[in-house]
Protein backbone atom coordinates (compact mmCIF):
# COMPACT_ATOMS: atom_id res chain seq x y z
CA UNK A 1 0.00 0.00 0.00
CA UNK A 2 1.31 3.45 -0.84
CA UNK A 3 1.80 5.86 2.05
CA UNK A 4 -1.01 8.35 2.46
CA UNK A 5 -1.26 11.41 4.63
CA UNK A 6 -3.79 10.64 7.32
CA UNK A 7 -2.94 13.58 9.53
CA UNK A 8 -6.22 15.37 8.81
CA UNK A 9 -8.24 12.43 10.14
CA UNK A 10 -8.73 11.00 13.61
CA UNK A 11 -7.06 7.63 13.17
CA UNK A 12 -7.13 4.75 15.69
CA UNK A 13 -3.98 3.40 17.27
CA UNK A 14 -3.76 0.05 19.08
CA UNK A 15 -1.04 1.18 21.45
CA UNK A 16 -3.16 4.06 22.70
CA UNK A 17 -6.16 1.79 22.84
CA UNK A 18 -4.29 -0.49 25.23
CA UNK A 19 -3.61 2.29 27.73
CA UNK A 20 -5.86 2.43 30.73
CA UNK A 21 -6.00 5.96 32.11
CA UNK A 22 -7.57 5.88 35.51
CA UNK A 23 -9.87 8.80 35.22
CA UNK A 24 -13.38 9.25 36.45
CA UNK A 25 -16.00 8.51 33.80
CA UNK A 26 -18.24 11.50 33.19
CA UNK A 27 -21.85 10.87 32.36
CA UNK A 28 -23.78 13.28 30.22
CA UNK A 29 -27.03 13.36 28.32
CA UNK A 30 -27.42 13.16 24.60
CA UNK A 31 -29.06 16.14 22.94
CA UNK A 32 -29.83 16.73 19.30
CA UNK A 33 -29.32 20.27 18.04
CA UNK A 34 -32.15 21.80 16.02
CA UNK A 35 -29.95 22.04 12.93
CA UNK A 36 -29.88 18.22 12.63
CA UNK A 37 -33.57 17.53 13.08
CA UNK A 38 -34.51 17.93 9.45
CA UNK A 39 -31.39 16.49 7.84
CA UNK A 40 -33.07 13.12 7.35
CA UNK A 41 -36.38 14.34 5.97
CA UNK A 42 -37.50 12.24 3.00
CA UNK A 43 -34.40 10.14 3.36
CA UNK A 44 -34.09 6.46 4.22
CA UNK A 45 -31.55 4.45 6.17
CA UNK A 46 -30.47 0.83 6.19
CA UNK A 47 -28.22 -0.69 8.87
CA UNK A 48 -26.51 -4.05 8.57
CA UNK A 49 -25.25 -5.36 11.89
CA UNK A 50 -22.50 -7.93 12.40
CA UNK A 51 -21.28 -9.57 15.59
CA UNK A 52 -22.43 -9.67 19.19
CA UNK A 53 -25.39 -8.28 21.12
CA UNK A 54 -23.25 -5.26 22.00
CA UNK A 55 -23.33 -4.33 18.32
CA UNK A 56 -27.07 -5.00 18.11
CA UNK A 57 -27.59 -2.60 21.01
CA UNK A 58 -25.37 -0.01 19.28
CA UNK A 59 -27.36 -0.37 16.06
CA UNK A 60 -30.53 0.33 18.04
CA UNK A 61 -28.95 3.58 19.17
CA UNK A 62 -27.78 4.47 15.67
CA UNK A 63 -31.31 3.84 14.36
CA UNK A 64 -32.73 5.92 17.22
CA UNK A 65 -30.48 8.87 16.37
CA UNK A 66 -31.28 8.61 12.66
CA UNK A 67 -35.03 8.60 13.33
CA UNK A 68 -34.67 11.61 15.61
CA UNK A 69 -33.05 13.31 12.61
CA UNK A 70 -36.06 12.51 10.45
CA UNK A 71 -34.69 9.49 8.57
CA UNK A 72 -36.96 6.49 8.01
CA UNK A 73 -35.89 2.88 8.01
CA UNK A 74 -36.13 0.87 4.80
CA UNK A 75 -35.88 -2.86 4.30
CA UNK A 76 -34.81 -2.33 0.68
CA UNK A 77 -31.12 -1.63 0.46
CA UNK A 78 -31.54 0.05 -2.99
CA UNK A 79 -33.84 2.66 -1.48
CA UNK A 80 -31.40 3.74 1.23
CA UNK A 81 -29.81 7.20 1.31
CA UNK A 82 -27.66 6.23 4.27
CA UNK A 83 -26.27 2.73 4.49
CA UNK A 84 -24.29 1.76 7.56
CA UNK A 85 -22.35 -1.42 8.24
CA UNK A 86 -21.94 -1.89 11.99
CA UNK A 87 -19.00 -4.26 12.03
CA UNK A 88 -17.35 -6.92 14.19
CA UNK A 89 -13.59 -7.48 14.53
CA UNK A 90 -13.53 -10.56 16.75
CA UNK A 91 -12.28 -12.99 14.09
CA UNK A 92 -10.83 -12.61 10.65
CA UNK A 93 -13.80 -14.21 8.89
CA UNK A 94 -16.12 -11.60 10.42
CA UNK A 95 -13.95 -8.93 8.78
CA UNK A 96 -13.78 -10.74 5.45
CA UNK A 97 -17.58 -10.79 5.31
CA UNK A 98 -17.68 -7.02 5.71
CA UNK A 99 -15.08 -6.42 3.00
CA UNK A 100 -17.02 -8.80 0.73
CA UNK A 101 -20.24 -6.88 1.38
CA UNK A 102 -18.52 -3.57 0.70
CA UNK A 103 -17.35 -4.93 -2.65
CA UNK A 104 -20.96 -5.71 -3.56
CA UNK A 105 -22.13 -2.24 -2.49
CA UNK A 106 -19.98 -0.48 -5.04
CA UNK A 107 -22.66 -0.98 -7.69
CA UNK A 108 -25.28 0.75 -5.54
CA UNK A 109 -23.09 3.78 -5.22
CA UNK A 110 -22.73 3.98 -8.98
CA UNK A 111 -26.53 3.90 -9.38
CA UNK A 112 -27.27 6.30 -6.55
CA UNK A 113 -24.87 9.22 -6.26
CA UNK A 114 -26.74 10.60 -3.24
CA UNK A 115 -26.06 7.45 -1.23
CA UNK A 116 -23.80 7.73 1.82
CA UNK A 117 -22.01 4.54 2.82
CA UNK A 118 -20.62 4.35 6.33
CA UNK A 119 -18.61 1.76 8.25
CA UNK A 120 -18.78 1.83 12.04
CA UNK A 121 -18.42 -0.51 15.02
CA UNK A 122 -15.34 -2.50 15.96
CA UNK A 123 -13.45 -2.79 12.66
CA UNK A 124 -12.69 0.94 12.31
CA UNK A 125 -10.99 0.77 15.71
CA UNK A 126 -8.11 -0.98 13.90
CA UNK A 127 -5.71 1.29 12.09
CA UNK A 128 -5.02 -1.19 9.29
CA UNK A 129 -8.75 -1.49 8.57
CA UNK A 130 -9.21 2.28 8.30
CA UNK A 131 -6.28 2.46 5.90
CA UNK A 132 -7.71 -0.36 3.80
CA UNK A 133 -11.10 1.34 3.74
CA UNK A 134 -9.51 4.60 2.71
CA UNK A 135 -7.33 3.18 0.00
CA UNK A 136 -9.32 0.29 -1.43
CA UNK A 137 -12.89 1.48 -0.87
CA UNK A 138 -12.99 5.11 -2.02
CA UNK A 139 -16.79 5.03 -2.08
CA UNK A 140 -17.00 4.66 1.71
CA UNK A 141 -17.94 8.19 2.81
CA UNK A 142 -18.01 7.83 6.55
CA UNK A 143 -15.94 5.88 9.07
CA UNK A 144 -16.45 6.12 12.82
CA UNK A 145 -15.80 3.81 15.76
CA UNK A 146 -17.44 2.54 18.92
CA UNK A 147 -16.71 5.57 21.10
CA UNK A 148 -18.44 8.29 19.13
CA UNK A 149 -21.84 7.03 17.99
CA UNK A 150 -23.43 10.08 19.61
CA UNK A 151 -21.64 12.30 17.09
CA UNK A 152 -23.36 10.68 14.12
CA UNK A 153 -25.56 13.74 13.34
CA UNK A 154 -22.47 15.90 12.95
CA UNK A 155 -20.72 13.28 10.80
CA UNK A 156 -23.70 13.01 8.47
CA UNK A 157 -23.89 16.77 8.07
CA UNK A 158 -20.16 16.89 7.32
CA UNK A 159 -20.46 14.00 4.86
CA UNK A 160 -23.25 15.80 2.99
CA UNK A 161 -21.65 19.20 2.89
CA UNK A 162 -17.92 18.56 2.64
CA UNK A 163 -16.11 17.25 -0.39
CA UNK A 164 -13.93 15.02 1.75
CA UNK A 165 -14.69 11.77 3.44
CA UNK A 166 -15.41 11.78 7.17
CA UNK A 167 -13.07 9.56 9.18
CA UNK A 168 -13.15 9.92 12.93
CA UNK A 169 -12.13 7.07 15.20
CA UNK A 170 -11.08 7.61 18.81
CA UNK A 171 -8.58 5.15 20.24
CA UNK A 172 -9.67 5.79 23.77
CA UNK A 173 -13.11 5.67 25.24
CA UNK A 174 -14.80 8.89 26.20
CA UNK A 175 -17.61 9.47 28.63
CA UNK A 176 -20.83 7.59 29.02
CA UNK A 177 -23.58 9.23 27.02
CA UNK A 178 -27.04 8.59 28.45
CA UNK A 179 -30.43 9.04 26.83
CA UNK A 180 -29.37 8.31 23.28
CA UNK A 181 -32.71 7.54 21.62
CA UNK A 182 -33.11 3.86 20.74
CA UNK A 183 -35.14 2.16 18.11
CA UNK A 184 -35.43 -1.28 19.58
CA UNK A 185 -35.40 -4.29 17.33
CA UNK A 186 -37.85 -6.33 19.40
CA UNK A 187 -41.01 -5.43 21.25
CA UNK A 188 -40.87 -8.34 23.67
CA UNK A 189 -37.27 -8.47 24.86
CA UNK A 190 -34.68 -5.73 25.13
CA UNK A 191 -30.93 -5.36 25.47
CA UNK A 192 -29.75 -3.09 28.27
CA UNK A 193 -26.10 -2.10 28.38
CA UNK A 194 -24.88 -2.04 31.95
CA UNK A 195 -21.24 -1.35 31.14
CA UNK A 196 -18.92 -0.71 28.25
CA UNK A 197 -15.40 -1.93 27.48
CA UNK A 198 -13.23 -4.69 28.90
CA UNK A 199 -10.09 -4.69 31.05
CA UNK A 200 -9.37 -8.43 30.91
CA UNK A 201 -6.91 -8.51 28.03
CA UNK A 202 -7.24 -12.18 27.17
CA UNK A 203 -4.25 -12.56 24.87
CA UNK A 204 -6.26 -13.57 21.79
CA UNK A 205 -8.92 -10.92 22.05
CA UNK A 206 -9.23 -7.58 20.30
CA UNK A 207 -12.20 -6.32 22.33
CA UNK A 208 -10.22 -4.42 25.02
CA UNK A 209 -8.70 -2.44 22.12
CA UNK A 210 -11.88 -1.87 20.14
CA UNK A 211 -14.17 -1.16 23.09
CA UNK A 212 -11.85 0.57 25.52
CA UNK A 213 -11.63 0.41 29.28
CA UNK A 214 -14.41 -0.81 31.54
CA UNK A 215 -16.95 1.86 32.35
CA UNK A 216 -20.12 1.07 34.28
CA UNK A 217 -23.39 2.87 33.85
CA UNK A 218 -24.83 4.37 37.03
CA UNK A 219 -27.28 1.97 38.74
CA UNK A 220 -30.07 4.56 38.76
CA UNK A 221 -29.80 4.98 34.98
CA UNK A 222 -30.01 1.22 34.41
CA UNK A 223 -32.90 0.78 36.82
CA UNK A 224 -34.86 3.61 35.26
CA UNK A 225 -34.28 2.16 31.77
CA UNK A 226 -35.63 -1.19 32.95
CA UNK A 227 -38.65 0.52 34.56
CA UNK A 228 -39.35 2.33 31.30
CA UNK A 229 -39.18 -0.99 29.44
CA UNK A 230 -41.65 -2.48 31.92
CA UNK A 231 -44.02 0.45 31.25
CA UNK A 232 -43.69 -0.21 27.53
CA UNK A 233 -44.74 -3.84 28.06
CA UNK A 234 -41.37 -5.57 27.69
CA UNK A 235 -41.21 -9.00 29.30
CA UNK A 236 -37.49 -9.67 29.22
CA UNK A 237 -34.25 -7.74 29.54
CA UNK A 238 -30.74 -8.98 28.85
CA UNK A 239 -28.08 -7.03 30.70
CA UNK A 240 -25.09 -6.53 28.46
CA UNK A 241 -21.40 -6.10 29.09
CA UNK A 242 -18.19 -7.77 27.90
CA UNK A 243 -17.63 -8.87 31.48
CA UNK A 244 -20.78 -8.12 33.47
CA UNK A 245 -19.21 -9.51 36.64
CA UNK A 246 -16.80 -6.58 36.68
CA UNK A 247 -19.75 -4.18 36.82
CA UNK A 248 -19.24 -1.42 39.39
CA UNK A 249 -15.53 -2.00 39.94
CA UNK A 250 -14.81 1.39 38.39
CA UNK A 251 -17.11 3.36 40.69
CA UNK A 252 -15.10 5.65 42.95
CA UNK A 253 -17.96 7.13 44.98
CA UNK A 254 -20.21 4.13 45.66
CA UNK A 255 -19.82 0.45 46.45
CA UNK A 256 -22.22 -1.29 44.16
CA UNK A 257 -21.48 -4.54 42.34
CA UNK A 258 -23.13 -6.73 39.74
CA UNK A 259 -24.74 -8.79 42.54
CA UNK A 260 -26.30 -5.58 43.94
CA UNK A 261 -27.67 -4.65 40.55
CA UNK A 262 -29.10 -8.11 39.99
CA UNK A 263 -30.68 -8.09 43.46
CA UNK A 264 -32.29 -4.69 42.76
CA UNK A 265 -33.62 -5.80 39.38
CA UNK A 266 -34.88 -9.03 40.93
CA UNK A 267 -37.41 -6.90 42.85
CA UNK A 268 -38.84 -5.23 39.74
CA UNK A 269 -41.98 -6.52 38.02
CA UNK A 270 -40.32 -7.70 34.83
CA UNK A 271 -40.83 -11.37 33.95
CA UNK A 272 -37.34 -12.30 32.84
CA UNK A 273 -33.79 -11.12 33.43
CA UNK A 274 -30.79 -12.53 31.60
CA UNK A 275 -27.24 -11.27 31.43
CA UNK A 276 -24.21 -11.82 29.28
CA UNK A 277 -21.25 -12.20 29.17
CA UNK A 278 -19.87 -13.58 32.42
CA UNK A 279 -16.22 -14.12 33.22
CA UNK A 280 -15.51 -17.25 35.30
CA UNK A 281 -12.94 -15.52 37.48
CA UNK A 282 -15.15 -12.57 38.36
CA UNK A 283 -18.39 -14.48 38.85
CA UNK A 284 -18.58 -14.30 42.65
CA UNK A 285 -20.46 -16.17 45.37
CA UNK A 286 -22.75 -13.21 45.99
CA UNK A 287 -23.92 -13.24 42.39
CA UNK A 288 -24.53 -16.99 42.61
CA UNK A 289 -26.50 -16.41 45.80
CA UNK A 290 -28.68 -13.75 44.11
CA UNK A 291 -29.19 -16.09 41.15
CA UNK A 292 -30.38 -18.77 43.57
CA UNK A 293 -33.28 -16.48 44.58
CA UNK A 294 -34.80 -17.29 41.19
CA UNK A 295 -37.95 -15.30 40.43
CA UNK A 296 -37.26 -13.28 37.31
CA UNK A 297 -33.57 -14.30 37.12
CA UNK A 298 -33.48 -17.00 34.47
CA UNK A 299 -31.82 -20.39 35.14
CA UNK A 300 -29.33 -20.11 32.30
CA UNK A 301 -25.76 -18.88 32.32
CA UNK A 302 -23.36 -18.37 29.47
CA UNK A 303 -19.94 -18.86 31.03
CA UNK A 304 -17.14 -18.94 28.45
CA UNK A 305 -14.39 -21.38 29.43
CA UNK A 306 -12.26 -21.18 26.22
CA UNK A 307 -10.13 -24.26 27.01
CA UNK A 308 -9.89 -27.21 29.39
CA UNK A 309 -6.11 -27.11 29.62
CA UNK A 310 -4.43 -25.09 32.35
CA UNK A 311 -1.38 -24.45 30.17
CA UNK A 312 -3.54 -22.98 27.44
CA UNK A 313 -5.70 -21.02 29.90
CA UNK A 314 -2.55 -19.48 31.33
CA UNK A 315 -1.28 -18.43 27.92
CA UNK A 316 -4.73 -17.03 27.15
CA UNK A 317 -4.46 -14.93 30.34
CA UNK A 318 -7.82 -16.18 31.53
CA UNK A 319 -6.69 -16.03 35.20
CA UNK A 320 -8.44 -19.21 36.36
CA UNK A 321 -7.66 -22.90 36.23
CA UNK A 322 -9.81 -25.68 34.87
CA UNK A 323 -10.36 -26.87 38.46
CA UNK A 324 -11.57 -23.44 39.57
CA UNK A 325 -13.94 -23.31 36.62
CA UNK A 326 -15.38 -26.74 37.42
CA UNK A 327 -15.81 -25.67 41.04
CA UNK A 328 -17.87 -22.62 39.95
CA UNK A 329 -20.03 -24.79 37.73
CA UNK A 330 -20.69 -27.13 40.67
CA UNK A 331 -21.65 -24.21 42.90
CA UNK A 332 -23.99 -22.87 40.24
CA UNK A 333 -25.66 -26.25 39.80
CA UNK A 334 -26.16 -26.56 43.55
CA UNK A 335 -27.47 -23.01 43.94
CA UNK A 336 -29.74 -23.06 40.89
CA UNK A 337 -31.01 -26.63 40.43
CA UNK A 338 -31.45 -27.53 36.76
CA UNK A 339 -29.52 -24.50 35.53
CA UNK A 340 -28.45 -24.69 31.91
CA UNK A 341 -24.84 -23.70 31.33
CA UNK A 342 -23.45 -22.79 27.92
CA UNK A 343 -19.96 -21.72 26.97
CA UNK A 344 -17.46 -20.49 24.37
CA UNK A 345 -14.44 -22.55 23.32
CA UNK A 346 -11.46 -21.72 21.16
CA UNK A 347 -9.59 -24.60 19.49
CA UNK A 348 -6.17 -24.38 17.95
CA UNK A 349 -4.85 -21.64 20.22
CA UNK A 350 -1.10 -21.28 19.46
CA UNK A 351 0.76 -24.17 21.05
CA UNK A 352 -2.39 -26.17 21.89
CA UNK A 353 -1.26 -29.81 21.83
CA UNK A 354 -3.44 -32.81 21.21
CA UNK A 355 -3.28 -33.49 24.93
CA UNK A 356 -4.49 -29.96 25.70
CA UNK A 357 -7.34 -30.45 23.28
CA UNK A 358 -8.33 -33.78 24.87
CA UNK A 359 -8.57 -31.93 28.18
CA UNK A 360 -11.06 -29.54 26.60
CA UNK A 361 -13.16 -32.49 25.45
CA UNK A 362 -13.07 -33.97 28.95
CA UNK A 363 -14.13 -30.66 30.44
CA UNK A 364 -17.09 -30.36 28.06
CA UNK A 365 -18.30 -33.77 29.21
CA UNK A 366 -17.64 -33.06 32.87
CA UNK A 367 -19.52 -29.73 32.88
CA UNK A 368 -22.38 -31.10 30.75
CA UNK A 369 -22.65 -27.93 28.74
CA UNK A 370 -26.02 -27.55 27.05
CA UNK A 371 -24.54 -25.50 24.23
CA UNK A 372 -21.31 -23.89 23.10
CA UNK A 373 -20.06 -21.44 20.54
CA UNK A 374 -16.88 -22.98 19.20
CA UNK A 375 -14.20 -21.19 17.21
CA UNK A 376 -10.85 -21.82 15.59
CA UNK A 377 -8.28 -19.35 16.93
CA UNK A 378 -8.00 -16.34 14.65
CA UNK A 379 -4.91 -14.17 15.08
CA UNK A 380 -5.85 -10.52 15.60
CA UNK A 381 -3.19 -7.99 14.71
CA UNK A 382 -1.85 -6.15 17.75
CA UNK A 383 -2.89 -8.79 20.31
CA UNK A 384 -0.18 -10.81 22.12
CA UNK A 385 -1.40 -14.21 20.87
CA UNK A 386 -1.04 -13.12 17.25
CA UNK A 387 2.71 -13.16 17.87
CA UNK A 388 2.82 -16.58 19.58
CA UNK A 389 4.38 -19.39 17.63
CA UNK A 390 1.71 -21.56 16.08
CA UNK A 391 2.82 -24.74 14.35
CA UNK A 392 -0.49 -26.64 14.26
CA UNK A 393 -1.72 -26.94 10.66
CA UNK A 394 -5.20 -25.58 9.86
CA UNK A 395 -6.31 -29.05 8.75
CA UNK A 396 -5.60 -30.37 12.24
CA UNK A 397 -7.43 -27.42 13.83
CA UNK A 398 -10.47 -28.11 11.67
CA UNK A 399 -10.43 -31.76 12.75
CA UNK A 400 -10.35 -30.67 16.38
CA UNK A 401 -13.26 -28.30 15.85
CA UNK A 402 -15.25 -31.08 14.18
CA UNK A 403 -14.62 -33.50 17.04
CA UNK A 404 -15.47 -30.84 19.61
CA UNK A 405 -18.71 -29.94 17.84
CA UNK A 406 -19.82 -33.56 17.84
CA UNK A 407 -19.58 -33.65 21.62
CA UNK A 408 -21.07 -30.18 22.01
CA UNK A 409 -24.04 -31.21 19.87
CA UNK A 410 -24.65 -34.24 22.09
CA UNK A 411 -24.81 -31.75 24.95
CA UNK A 412 -27.39 -29.63 23.12
CA UNK A 413 -29.58 -32.66 22.51
CA UNK A 414 -29.22 -34.01 26.06
CA UNK A 415 -30.04 -30.55 27.44
CA UNK A 416 -33.17 -30.41 25.31
CA UNK A 417 -34.22 -34.02 26.02
CA UNK A 418 -34.63 -33.34 29.71
CA UNK A 419 -37.72 -31.29 28.84
CA UNK A 420 -39.53 -33.99 26.86
CA UNK A 421 -42.93 -34.56 28.48
CA UNK A 422 -42.53 -31.44 30.64
CA UNK A 423 -44.66 -28.30 30.60
CA UNK A 424 -42.46 -25.23 30.07
CA UNK A 425 -43.14 -21.51 30.03
CA UNK A 426 -42.40 -19.94 26.66
CA UNK A 427 -42.06 -16.23 26.03
CA UNK A 428 -43.53 -16.00 22.54
CA UNK A 429 -41.33 -13.88 20.28
CA UNK A 430 -43.00 -14.26 16.93
CA UNK A 431 -43.70 -16.55 14.02
CA UNK A 432 -41.09 -19.09 13.02
CA UNK A 433 -39.03 -17.94 10.00
CA UNK A 434 -39.23 -21.37 8.43
CA UNK A 435 -42.91 -22.07 8.98
CA UNK A 436 -45.36 -19.17 9.45
CA UNK A 437 -47.91 -21.52 11.04
CA UNK A 438 -45.59 -22.02 13.98
CA UNK A 439 -44.91 -19.66 16.85
CA UNK A 440 -41.50 -19.55 18.40
CA UNK A 441 -40.03 -18.47 21.70
CA UNK A 442 -37.66 -19.35 24.52
CA UNK A 443 -38.02 -21.15 27.84
CA UNK A 444 -36.43 -19.88 31.07
CA UNK A 445 -33.47 -22.22 30.34
CA UNK A 446 -33.09 -20.48 26.96
CA UNK A 447 -34.36 -23.40 24.89
CA UNK A 448 -36.01 -22.58 21.60
CA UNK A 449 -39.56 -23.94 21.33
CA UNK A 450 -41.77 -24.16 18.23
CA UNK A 451 -45.51 -24.78 18.56
CA UNK A 452 -48.78 -24.11 16.77
CA UNK A 453 -50.58 -21.05 18.07
CA UNK A 454 -52.31 -17.79 17.23
CA UNK A 455 -50.47 -14.60 16.48
CA UNK A 456 -52.14 -12.76 19.36
CA UNK A 457 -49.96 -14.80 21.73
CA UNK A 458 -46.84 -12.93 20.60
CA UNK A 459 -45.41 -11.10 23.59
CA UNK A 460 -47.10 -13.39 26.11
CA UNK A 461 -45.73 -16.16 28.30
CA UNK A 462 -47.59 -19.39 27.58
CA UNK A 463 -47.38 -22.94 28.86
CA UNK A 464 -46.28 -25.52 26.31
CA UNK A 465 -46.05 -29.28 26.76
CA UNK A 466 -42.95 -30.58 25.01
CA UNK A 467 -43.50 -33.68 22.84
CA UNK A 468 -40.14 -33.89 21.16
CA UNK A 469 -36.61 -32.62 21.63
CA UNK A 470 -34.24 -32.03 18.71
CA UNK A 471 -30.64 -30.82 18.80
CA UNK A 472 -31.49 -27.16 18.18
CA UNK A 473 -35.08 -26.85 19.34
CA UNK A 474 -38.05 -28.32 21.14
CA UNK A 475 -41.47 -29.01 19.70
CA UNK A 476 -44.62 -28.89 21.76
CA UNK A 477 -48.32 -28.12 22.16
CA UNK A 478 -49.81 -25.21 23.97
CA UNK A 479 -51.65 -26.12 27.17
CA UNK A 480 -52.86 -22.70 28.26
N1 LIG B 1 -10.09 -16.18 17.76
C1 LIG B 1 -11.09 -17.07 17.93
N2 LIG B 1 -12.10 -16.86 18.79
C2 LIG B 1 -12.09 -15.71 19.51
N3 LIG B 1 -12.94 -15.23 20.44
C3 LIG B 1 -12.49 -14.03 20.85
N4 LIG B 1 -11.35 -13.71 20.21
C4 LIG B 1 -11.08 -14.75 19.37
C5 LIG B 1 -10.03 -15.02 18.45
N5 LIG B 1 -9.03 -14.18 18.25
C6 LIG B 1 -14.11 -15.97 20.90
C7 LIG B 1 -14.04 -16.29 22.40
C8 LIG B 1 -15.04 -15.32 22.99
C9 LIG B 1 -16.05 -15.20 21.87
C10 LIG B 1 -16.93 -14.01 21.94
O1 LIG B 1 -15.26 -15.17 20.71
O2 LIG B 1 -14.46 -17.61 22.60
O3 LIG B 1 -15.62 -15.79 24.18
FE1 LIG C 1 -12.23 -10.53 25.11
FE2 LIG C 1 -11.47 -11.74 27.37
FE3 LIG C 1 -12.66 -9.29 27.46
FE4 LIG C 1 -14.11 -11.45 26.78
S1 LIG C 1 -13.11 -11.10 28.77
S2 LIG C 1 -14.10 -9.45 25.74
S3 LIG C 1 -12.63 -12.71 25.66
S4 LIG C 1 -10.66 -9.81 26.56
Image: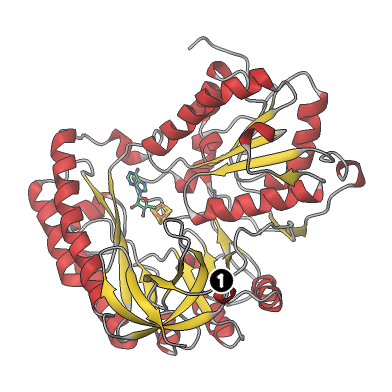
Compared to 219, does 132 lie above or below?
above
Q: Quadrant of residue 388?
A: top left
Residue projecting furthest to the left: 355
What residue is shown with label 1? 455
The answer to whether any part of residue 392 appears in the image is no
User: What residue lies at 41% left-to-right and 35% top-to-bottom?
Assistant: 382
Q: Nearer the viewer, residue 393 or 286?
A: 393
Using the rendered image of the protein, determine whether residue 243 is visible from the camera's viewpoint: yes
Residue 421 position, x and y percent, is: 27, 84
Residue 82: quarter of image: top right
Residue, far right: 34
How many tags in the picture?
Answer: 1
Q: Residue furthest top?
A: 2
Please, is residue 444 above or below residue 319 in the view? Answer: below
Q: Position of residue 391 (x, y in %)?
A: 15, 33
Up the image or down, 388 lies above or below 342; here it is above
Residue lying at 29% horizontally and 78% vertically, measured from the top left: 467
User: Is 180 placed left or right of 22 in the picture?
Assistant: right
Q: Residue at x 51, y 56 (%)?
A: 53
Residue sitting nearer the eye, 59 or 91: 59
Confirm or reject: label 1 Cβ below 8 Å from ligand 1: no
Q: Position of residue 445 (x, y in %)?
A: 37, 76
- Coloration mode: secondary structure
Q: Can you give x and y, in whole percent of width and height, for residue 473 in the image?
A: 33, 66
Q: Residue at x 85, y 38 (%)?
A: 39
Is disc 1 placed on a helix, strand or loop? helix
Amino acid sequence: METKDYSKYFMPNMQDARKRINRYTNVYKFTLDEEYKKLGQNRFYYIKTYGCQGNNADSEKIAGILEAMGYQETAEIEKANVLLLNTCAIRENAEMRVFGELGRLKGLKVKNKDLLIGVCGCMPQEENVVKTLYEKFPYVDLVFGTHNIHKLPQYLRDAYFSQDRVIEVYSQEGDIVEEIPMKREHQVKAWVNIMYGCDEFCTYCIVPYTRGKERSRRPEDIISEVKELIDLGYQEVTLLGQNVNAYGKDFVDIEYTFADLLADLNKLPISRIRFTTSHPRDLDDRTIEVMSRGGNIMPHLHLPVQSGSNTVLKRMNRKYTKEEYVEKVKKLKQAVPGISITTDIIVGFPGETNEDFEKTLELVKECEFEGAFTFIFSPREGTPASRYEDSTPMEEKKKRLYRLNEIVNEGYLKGNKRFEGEVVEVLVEGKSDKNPNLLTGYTPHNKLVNFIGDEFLIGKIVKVKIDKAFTWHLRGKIVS
